[in-house]
Amino acid sequence: MNKIIASFAFLAVLFSAAFLQAQCPMPPNNNPTVISGDNAGSFTLSSNKSLIISAGNFTGNVSILSGTAVVYISPGATFQPATLTNLNGKIINCGTASIPSFNINNDSAAIENYNKLTFTGTIGTNKKSFW
């Protein structure tokens, strides 16, 4: 009887953990530029702009100039920028992100990770940031 109770408790915890994982938020809708395939372009995000990587592999350059700017990586997409400069806004990762060296330039910098995130370089900061 104790084995049955222990087994049931284990299964309940296992299934509860699967349902309690954080859910990825919806993509932002503030003036989005949507990339739906492999792309190596350069993008500068100013106030209230967003870059949505909906599919494919992004290997270009990104400059996030404003605290209200957002880079959103959809499930199944890969964000692997060659350069990431002026990180003042937010990165929301629901796919796979490989982040190179970057500097945090103001208090509004944030990275929200819901899937796979790796740092391939160094992070420079003298400001507070949110992870």
Image (tube, rainbow, N blue to C red):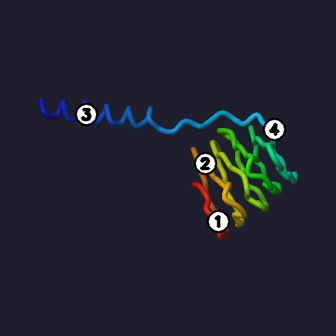
Rendered location of residue 14, percent (x, y)? 36, 36
Does 131 appear above or below 21?
Answer: below
Judge left or right: residue 14 versus residue 4: right
**Compared to 59, does 3 lie above or below?**
above
Amino acid type, label 2: Glu
Secondary element at tag 4: strand
Q: Secondary structure at mark 1?
A: loop
Which of the two discs, 3 and 4, sits closer to the camera? 4
- Residue 9 is labelled as 3
Relative side of 50 to 13, left or right: right
Q: Nearer the viewer, mark 2 or mark 3?
A: 2
Foreground mark, 2 or 1, reads 1
Crowd band around label 1 with a 10 angstrom C-alpha radius: few (<14), some (14–19), many (20+): few
Looking at the rendered image, the disc whose residue lies closer to the viewer, 4 or 1, is: 1
Q: Disc 2 vs disc 3: Cβ atoms closer than 8 Å? A: no
Answer with left or right where residue 39 lies relative to residue 97. Answer: right
Instruction: Indicate which disc residue 112 carries.
Output: 2
User: Mark 1, mark 3: which one is toward the viewer?
Assistant: 1
Residue under numbered circle 1: 127
Q: If you read the primary sequence from the N terminus, does the residue marked by circle 4 or circle 1 appear first?
A: 4
